[in-house]
Image (spheres, rainbow, N blue to C red):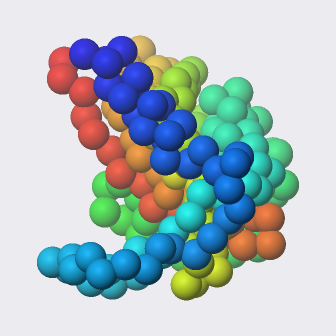
Amino acid sequence: MKKFFSFCVVAFFATACNNADKPAASAPSDSTVYPYKASYSSAFTCSDNNKNAAAVLQSYKDWEDNKLANAPAYYADSLRFNSWNGENYYLSRDSAIHLWQKYRDSLSSSKIEVVAWTNLHSTDKNEDWVGVWYKQTDTYKTGKVDSAFYQDDNRIANGKVNFISSKRQNLKK
């Protein structure tokens, strides 16, 4: 099932964001009537700014490798972090790194398996986003092991992450 899920996600993103043969355009206008109006935006296109995705993915790799000293390269001077546990933070970059390092120091290892990522641009907000779907397995120094699937939305401004919204799906034991 996991392999099928991974295949479906990758196939979806490969076809949804394959813009190699066509120029980036704003969201298509048609006569479709939707039952809801998006409160934020529904005008997204796939972005060809691969530097955004590379920076976000490197920040995940630095978490895994416990190299949070590299974080200033990826994060804005201040950022908003909506955690998967419902807590919302507005922090300076240094405070965020300190908070994350404290948690990372409680782990003996953290392994990340990226399932898929998307590189998006909101045409009506003129904002860049990188979405990442991944499985993370944390091993605490106490020996406890915790695994879950995550979906993070990372907003990029001036080449740096300034907002993260994280969602978590626990895995069955």
Q: Is residue 155 visible?
A: no
Image position of 79 with respect to 50: above or below:
below
Between 24 and 64, the one nearer to me in the picture? 24
Total marks in image: 0
Q: Residue 116 at x, y = what percent?
A: 51, 35
Between 33 and 60, the one nearer to me in the picture? 33
Residue at the spot 50% in from the left edge and 57% down from the top edge: 153
Q: Residue 95 at x, y = what percent?
A: 66, 65
Residue at the spot 80% in from the left edge and 72% down from the top edge: 158
Q: Quadrant of residue 108?
A: top right
Residue at the spot 45% in from the left edge and 61% down from the top edge: 165
Quarter in which the C terminus is drawn: top left
- Using residue 2 as the reference point, say whether residue 19 is left or right of it: right
Q: Residue 136 at x, y = what percent?
A: 46, 29
Between 105 and 165, the one nearer to me in the picture? 165
Q: Is residue 131 visible?
A: yes
Quarter in which the N terminus is drawn: top left
Residue at the spot 67% in from the left edge and 41% down from the top edge: 57
Between 85 and 123, the one nearer to me in the picture? 123
Image position of 91 with respect to 53: above or below:
below
Q: Quadrant of residue 117?
A: top right
Q: Residue 66 at x, y = what percent?
A: 70, 32
Image position of 165 with respect to 149: above or below:
below
